[in-house]
Image (cartoon, rainbow, N blue to C red):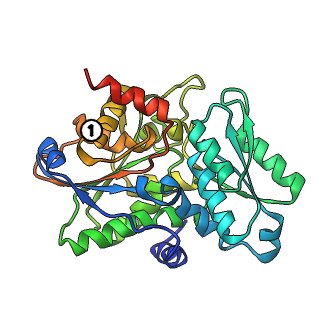
């Protein structure tokens, strides 16, 4: 478990490293929601997603011996870039196991940032097992993508900033929508948000075929999605919640929400057209839930976290063209 003090300590480590992304308000979004909507655009973050927060918080706490031996991570792409960037800043060698069909932008950016990329088949390869075997062979430290206290505390600085920024605006959010894959971002953010606003409702948003956390919150135990599940949201394809993240989330969260790929595509078009933001599919799910009316927003203050903007140009162009007819 982590506490609020762990998130505050992470914020101190990240000072000058992570961007304090703004809260954006849009008249078009307020009109669509019938209430007040604040958007936290982590697509403007270092490496294009929130993942640098947890990765840097983890790597900055390695011992000198661990740092010299390096780290190994497994990721669909955003955690990979966060780990590679943190390693470059701290002088820690990094190797990341990634799906061979990950967006080209994420593969290329990870290499550009200095990470060694090892690819595996998404459907048949077990990235976590490959990473752990490689780490054992090299004597390296494994950096989980979500299920670790250092990672959760680092990601929780998103929620800490939201709480601080809402206070600065003299607004009290009634609900916060956050994307969910492994659950680290929402677990850490909910910990910070509940400290500041005990009555706030924090909701996961997932792709409808990867709604493992939504179903787990309903049943009270960790559920698993079908092995053949598919979604355009490459960043949110966890098959089951993390052990640590779910223990936190089941205590702090409201019910979960799920969105279709079509709703995600429309949210990406809205973000470009009305917010002037480039958002990747997994980063758009919370916005998609709001726009699709998955939760009541009329007369309420709602915060939406846009978690990332690392999308291949070809896919992004295709999605934008779909809405131009």
Which residue reaches farthest right?
Answer: 137
Q: Which one is in front, 224 or 324?
A: 324
Q: Is residue 237 left or right of residue 73?
A: left
Q: Position of residue 160 (x, y in %)?
A: 39, 69
Residue ID at (22%, 58%): 174
For the image, the number of numbered tags is 1
| Res 241 quadrant in image | top right
Q: Which residue is mark 1?
A: 270
Q: Position of residue 213 (x, y in %)?
A: 46, 42
Q: Is residue 108 left or right of residue 174?
A: right
Residue ID at (40%, 43%): 279
Q: Quadrant of the N terminus?
A: bottom right
Residue ID at (30%, 39%): 289
Residue 120 sits above or below residue 47 on the image: above
| Res 316 quadrant in image | top left
| Element type at mark 1 | helix
Residue ID at (43%, 50%): 307
Residue 301 sits above or below residue 261 on the image: below
Residue 132 sits above or below residue 315 on the image: below
Instruction: Check disc 1: other Cα within 10 Å, few if <14, some if 14-19, many if 20+.
Output: many
Q: Position of residue 266 (x, y in %)?
A: 30, 31
Q: Position of residue 101 (x, y in %)?
A: 63, 31
Residue 228 sits above or below residue 180 on the image: above
Q: Is residue 198 visible?
A: yes
Q: Quadrant of the C terminus?
A: top left
Q: Is residue 251 visible?
A: no
Q: Which one is in front, 275 or 148?
A: 275
């Amino acid at each position: 478990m982590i506490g609020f003090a762990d998130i505050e300590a992470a914020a101190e480590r990240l000072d000058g490293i992570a961007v304090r992304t703004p809260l954006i308000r849009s008249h078009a979004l307020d009109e669509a929601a019938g209430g007040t909507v604040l958007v936290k655009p982590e697509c403007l973050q270092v490496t294009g997603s929130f993942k640098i927060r947890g990765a840097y918080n983890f790597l900055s706490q390695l011992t000198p011996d661990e740092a010299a031996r390096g780290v190994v991570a497994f990721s669909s792409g955003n955690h990979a870039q966060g780990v590679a960037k943190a390693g470059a800043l701290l002088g820690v060698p990094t190797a990341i196991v990634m799906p061979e069909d990950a967006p080209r932008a994420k593969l290329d950016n990870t290499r550009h940032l200095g990470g060694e990329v090892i690819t595996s088949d998404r459907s048949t390869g077990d990235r976590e097992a490959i990473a752990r075997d490689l780490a054992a062979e090299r004597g390296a430290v494994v950096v989980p993508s979500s299920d670790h206290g250092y990672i959760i505390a680092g990601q929780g600085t998103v929620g800490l900033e939201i709480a601080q920024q809402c206070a600065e605006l003299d607004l009290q959010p009634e609900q916060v929508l956050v994307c969910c894959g492994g659950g680290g971002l929402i677990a850490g953010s909910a910990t910070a948000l509940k400290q500041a606003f005990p009555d706030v409702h924090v909701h996961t948003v997932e792709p409808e075929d990867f709604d493992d956390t939504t179903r787990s919150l309903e049943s009270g135990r960790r559920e698993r999605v079908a092995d053949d599940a598919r979604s355009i949201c490459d960043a949110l394809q966890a098959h089951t919640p993390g052990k640590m993240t779910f223990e936190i989330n089941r205590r702090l969260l409201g019910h979960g929400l799920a969105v279709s790929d079509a709703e995600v595509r429309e949210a990406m078009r809205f973000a470009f057209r009305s917010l002037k933001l480039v958002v990747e599919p997994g980063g758009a799910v919370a916005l998609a839930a709001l726009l699709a009316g998955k939760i009541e927003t009329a007369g309420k203050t709602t915060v939406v976290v846009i978690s990332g903007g690392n999308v291949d140009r070809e896919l992004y162009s295709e999605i934008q063209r779909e809405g131009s007819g």
